[in-house]
Each structure stands twice: as C-alpha cells, then as structure tokens.
Amino acid sequence: MGCSGGRAAGRAVAAVMGGSLLAGCATRAGAGQAGPTGTQVTPARPPALSDTRLRALLLTAGDLGEDHARQAVPSPSPGEPTASVKGCRSLERWARERPLKDLAGEAATRFVSPSTRHELTEELHSDRPAALSARLREFFDAYTGCRRYTLTSPSLTIDMTVSQVPAPRLGDESRACLEQLTSFTGPNDFTKTVAVREGNITVLLRGTPALVDREIGTAVARLPTG
C-alpha cells in the first residue's frame, strides 16, 4: 500500500472480510470445475488438508524477496470494535457469517515491505472440491450487485469501489477483482484480490496489485498436484 492511511484502510477491509473473498469479481472456470451436467473431473485427492499441512504450503519471505518481512495476521481481540459495512446487505450478512471459516482446513500469513509499504496477505482454505467450489460460488454471487459500499471503523470511513478484472488462467477456477479505497485521511488506494481453486485447496491473495499479480503463480505452484 502506498501510505499509512492506505494500510489502515486495508486492515479495516481485512477485519470485515475475516478470511472471506471480496465482492463483484470476475470468474473463470477451468476443466476441473463441475460442468452443466454436474460431472466433476478434478483429480481425486483426500477430502481436505489439515491446518498444519496448509501452513507448510504458504508463501515464505524467500519467495517474495529479502525486502519483505512476515507478520502475524491481525485478528480483533474479544470486545474490540470492528469495522462495519453500509450499503450492501449481502456483504453485511456474509461479513457476519464468515462463510469460509467453517471449512475443514485453513491457514494464513501476511507480508509487509518496509521500504515500499507494499502488503500481501495469503489465505489457504481446504475442503472437498465440490464443497469448496460451491462455497466460493455462493460467496461471489452474493456480491454481484455490490459494486460500491461504505466501510466504517472506529477510526476510518472508507468508500469502496469494486471493479471486475480478468482472472488468471490458473487452477480449476479463478476469480479476481480490484478495489479502490477512498477515505478522508489519505489519497485513494488500490487493493487487488485473486482467488484460485486447485482441487481441494483455494489460494487467496489480497494486497498491493502488482505484488498480487507477481506472486499468485508462485502461490499456486506450491500446492500439491495429483
């Protein structure tokens, strides 16, 4: 992100989304996704990977370069005020329900570059391919009409504008969107979100657009195949 205000805005977005993908994004289905007849051609795998196994598949500081330091993924303390959504009922509902949080396996990490202030958050989610694909599809469908909404936290009010962008041609299905964050405390900022499902694992990258574009291929390449 380009400034401290933008970084705070990004943290507010993450607090609301809580491990969920963002709205209004383009989608691409590959050969491994269920077709119109419901046929599933994804290679057979165990139903889900454990949290421990997923953590071993996360990006490392070595993948991003020496200038990027790993940080703990922030989570609100009990009773701590969190950000809220206005102007998008479906987003409000999904933010409350945390639709990806009850999947079988999950892991997350975060990187920050002190010199450029670029940020990148990675999430891995695992479950049966059909369940994972259905959950992601339901999530993105819920946000189709929410191109604009307002995010309010104790310290910031952010106007969010979401644009469809081409999804990378990776995995069995992929989704991508670009968010413009506008607040009174700093200049406009942009965040990109990309999700790729490969069999029974979904990779989610969210952060500085150039960094997301650069690292999504590496993140997918770290996943087991077959």
Image (cartoon, rainbow, N blue to C red):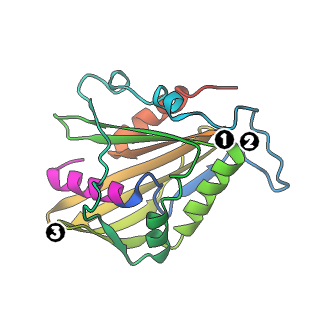
Q: Which residue is mark 2?
A: 31
Q: Residue at x 45, y 42 (%)?
A: 123
Q: Which residues are magenta?
A: 1-15
Quadrant including the C terminus: top right
Residue 82: x and y in percent read: 29, 64
Q: Nearer the viewer, residue 103 or 161?
A: 103
CA distance separating discs 3 and 1: 40 Å
> In the rendered structure, which amino acid carries the disc numbered 3?
Phe
Residue 40: x and y in percent read: 79, 44
- Label 1: which secondary element: loop
Residue 119 covered by magenta stretch: no
- First of labels 1, 2 by sequence position: 2
Q: Is residue 87 left or right of residue 185?
A: right
Q: Which residue is mark 1?
A: 172
> In the rendered structure, which amino acid carries the disc numbered 2?
Ala
Image marks 1 and 2: residues in contact by CB distance under 8 Å: yes
